[in-house]
Image (tube, rainbow, N blue to C red):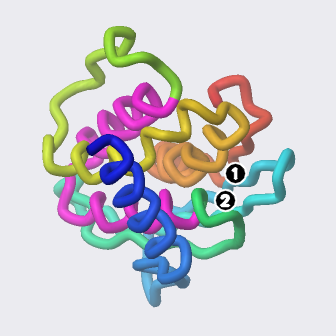
Amino acid sequence: MFDDLRDLYQEVILDHGKNPRNFGKPASFNRTARGDNPMCGDKITVYLTVGEDGIIQDAGFDGRGCAISQASASLMTEILKGKPVKEAEALFGSFHDMCTKDDEEWTDHGPVDPDAMDKLQVMSGVREFPMRVKCATLAWHTMNAAVHGEAVTSTENAAF
C-alpha cells in the first residue's frame, strides 16, 4: 500500500514536472517576484493577480528547474487561484512545515483548505531528501515574496 501511494505521488510529480500548469507570463498581473536556488540552478518567476478584495484571481509562473521545482510551482498555482492572500500565506507556512518537519512539529499558520493540503501531500517525500527541500519550496518562497512586494528572493536567504 505504501509503495502504491509513493508511486502515485511520483506519477503526479512527473506529470506536473513535464506538463506544468499555469506556465508562462500572463498578459496581466499586479504582483511578481523572482526566486532562484543557486545551489542547483532552479529559477522561477511567480506572477499573481490579486484583487482589491485580497483574493488571488490568477497565478502563473515561468522559469527553469528540476521536475520537483516545476511540479511544486504547477501545483501551487493551481491551488492559489481563488484563495485569499492570508490563506496563501498560511498554505506557504503549512507546506514549508510539511517539507521540513515531522508531523508533530508543525506550527498552526492559520486556516487552510484541507483539500489543498491533501493535493500538496505529493511533495511531502522531499523531507527525506534535504537537498530537494529548496527545490520544492522555491516557488512558495517566491510567491510569498511577491505578495509582500519583494521583487527577488533566493534560497540563500536565511528564511529558507
Residue at image point 40% right, 49% down: 6
Amino acid type shown at disc 2:
Arg
Q: Which quadrant holds the N terminus?
A: top left
- Foreground: 75 or 145? 75
Q: CA distance from mark 2 to mark 1?
A: 5 Å
What span is colored magenta in the figure? 70-99
The reply to whether dot 2 and dot 1 touch (C-beta < 8 Å) is yes
Quick one: quadrant of the C terminus?
top right
**Location of residue 83 by image quarter:** bottom left
Residue at 38% across / 10% down in the picture? Answer: 105
Q: Is residue 65 magenta?
A: no
Q: Position of residue 72 (x, y in %)?
A: 48, 57
What residue is pinned by disc 1? Answer: 152
Task: Look at the picture and state if 80 lies above or below 122.
Answer: below
Relative depth, front residue between 145 and 37: 37
Residue 20 position within the rendered picture, expressed as x and y whole percent measured from the top left: 48, 77
The secondary structure that dominates the magenta segment is: helix
Q: Is residue 26 left or right of residue 145?
A: left
Q: Is residue 15 left or right of residue 53?
A: right
Q: Is residue 11 left or right of residue 155?
A: left
Residue lying furthest top in this view? 104
Q: Secondary structure at mark 2?
A: strand
Residue assigned mark 2:
34
Q: Is residue 38 left or right of residue 152?
A: right
- Residue drawn 60% across and 58% down? 69
Q: Which mark is residue 71?
A: none
